[in-house]
Amino acid sequence: MAFTHPVSRPFLTGRELEYVTDAVSGGWISSQGPYVRRFEEAFAAWNGVAHGVACSSGTAALTLALRALGIGPGDEVIVPEFTMIASAWAVTYTGATPVFVDCADDLNIDVTRVEEKITPRTRAIMPVHVYGRRCDMDAIMDIAHQYNLRVVEDSAEAHGVRPVGDIACFSLFANKIITAGEGGVCLTDDPRLAGQLAHLRAMAFTRDHSFLHKKLAYNHRMTAMQGAVALAQVERLDDILAARREIEARYDAALKDVPGITLMPPRDVLWMYDLRAERREELRAHLDARGVETRLFFKPMSRQPGYLDPVWPTLNAHRFSEDGLYLPTHTGLTADDQEYIAGAVREFYTSG
């Protein structure tokens, strides 16, 4: 069905059309077009990081990051139980093994449980800033320093959370805080890692483009049209984050006293407004009938068929997945939109 209040909608109110038109009319539509480089430089500068390397998706960004760090078969990477499966898949794509750590009450990786999962094969930790909540990066960086591990931040849902790890990876899918429709970007301060990321995303061509490829690489390049949209989004990132802070505050105020609803901890940046709901499936049906789309929380990685572990029913990640959902959250959401959505939630829990 077509929802009157979809869970997400891109916010394309800047110079996106102007830049895309310029890219097309100038004939520079491949990854060689200038808009990719301009986006990389702008996003890196906004984050106070030296290098940005754009690519075809957030999943590609994670895969490139792990490969650039030399992670491969026989290695292990610490990954949260509570995340979108792309985090684990990126590890598997390299031939390494994801090792899962349960979440804390904020849905982020429980840093108190990380060390017990470290083995002699562990090479990296992949914290995920879930729904825009920054992980305890001080603790993670301390553990990484103690055990000589690399840190790849999965920041797919957290544009605006400043990177501190070796490489931070962002998604630019249509439902993210900023978007290119599809796409991703890696940020790093290390020039050698940046060079390796760029090399791997572009099929590992030699400088003379001789078609002699010395390593397995990928065609994970971003097009100029995507770069044009992404650049226009970065130019408005401060305004986008400010608008989303207001959206979070309005939802907090409207839902704080609704019986049956448990609000989640504040977010450092708002990607999606998540909450826990009694009689969740009935609530979803009620909202669906009123044109309000919702989405469920992630399921534990150990419940996924490809990583199945019988421990999954005991996990915090499973407990949250059983009653969690998120409401429509996008930059163009108005106060009237939110009052309608919150009113529909209140109606469900107070109508008897």
Image (tube, grey):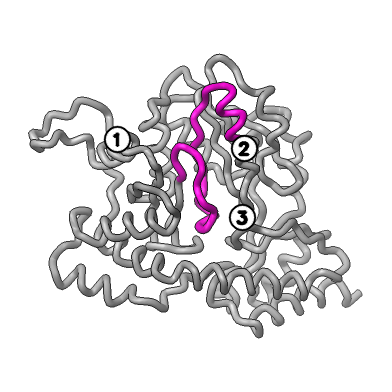
Secondary structure under badge 3? helix
Q: Give the amino acid at mark 2.
A: Pro
What residue is drawn where x is 81% and y is 60%?
Answer: 262
The residue pinned by badge 2 equals 80
What residue is drawn where x is 65% and y is 23%?
Answer: 117
The residue pinned by badge 1 equals 196
Can the viewer see residue 55 in this picture? no
What residue is drawn where x is 73% and y is 55%?
Answer: 324
Secondary structure under badge 2? strand
Can the viewer see residue 345 in this picture? yes
Badge 2 or badge 3: first in the primary sequence: 2
Q: Which residues are magenta?
A: 140-168
Q: Give the amino acid at mark 3.
A: Tyr
C-alpha distance separating marks 1 and 2:
26 Å
The residue pinned by badge 3 equals 131
The correct choice, above or below, for 150 with respect to 62 in the image is above
| Marker disc for residue 183 | none
Q: In the image, which is nearer the foreground, mark 1 or mark 2? A: 1
